[in-house]
Amino acid sequence: MSMLYLWHPSVSGDGKVLDCVLTRGDSDQVGGGSERFVSALASTLEIGTIPLKWAIKPYRCNFYSEYWSEGGWESRWDFIWRVTVHFKAQVAVRPLKLGYLGIDDIDDYSPLVESYKFDPFSCLVAGSFASEEKARETARRIANDRELVTARKNAAAQDPVIQVLRVDEKAFHLRAALGSGEASFFQGEYPELALSFLEAAGAVTHVRG
């Protein structure tokens, strides 16, 4: 088993921003991202360009849950880290087909590596579409649907931050950061309602590993 797993790298249209997801393997040591660690992630994807800046943020997310069917919000919304890396020059990543790469590197230790364990937890709802048009249409609905807006206000959440990313020639991921909260946030209506919108639109909402 690898220390960590890197999933679904996607590069922005200008070729200068990498977005990917990390999940736990034998280790959960991921913090703010040391230069050594972020360079190792880029090297795993055969990117030789030196990263300029980056951000690593922990979330609870539906898509990568290892124990999706075992019940309970903690299983349904498992821990991940979303990594965003900016480069000065254009880079190229050959998309992975709904798969993952094992990584034997871990981040340098800092107090941030423990932070993901404590609430409030940030919520990332994600789904995979075969059509970019359908993914973007669903993104608009999640942002503007009246029922979802009401649920968002009841949860005291800010407007969602939504992106549609190409992770393969035939796969587009919708990733929506919905806000953050304690257990009651995840057990409430809003995250599950957003997830139901993805499922109703035909999205795959749990990774097929």
Image (tube, rainbow, N blue to C red):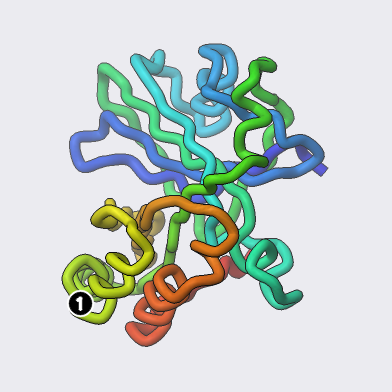
In this view, the residue in front, 138 or 181, is 181
**Residue at coordinates 63% horizontally, 57% vertically from top-left?**
78
Judged left or right of residue 159, residue 209 is right
> Can I make out residue 162 in this image?
no
In this view, the residue in front, 132 or 190, is 190
Residue 138, horizontal then vertical, whole percent: 25, 73
In this view, the residue in front, 92 or 152, is 152
Q: Is residue 35 above or below residue 29?
A: above
Q: Which residue position is annotated with label 1?
A: 145
**Residue at coordinates 39% horizontally, 40% vertically from top-left?**
19
State which quadrant residue 208 falls in. Answer: bottom right
User: What count of labels does the image hold?
Assistant: 1
State which quadrant residue 199 falls in. Answer: bottom left
Quadrant where the image shows the N terminus: top right
Q: In the image, what residue type sits under mark 1?
A: Asp
> Can I make out residue 82 in this image?
yes
**Residue at coordinates 38% horizontally, 83% vertically from top-left?**
202
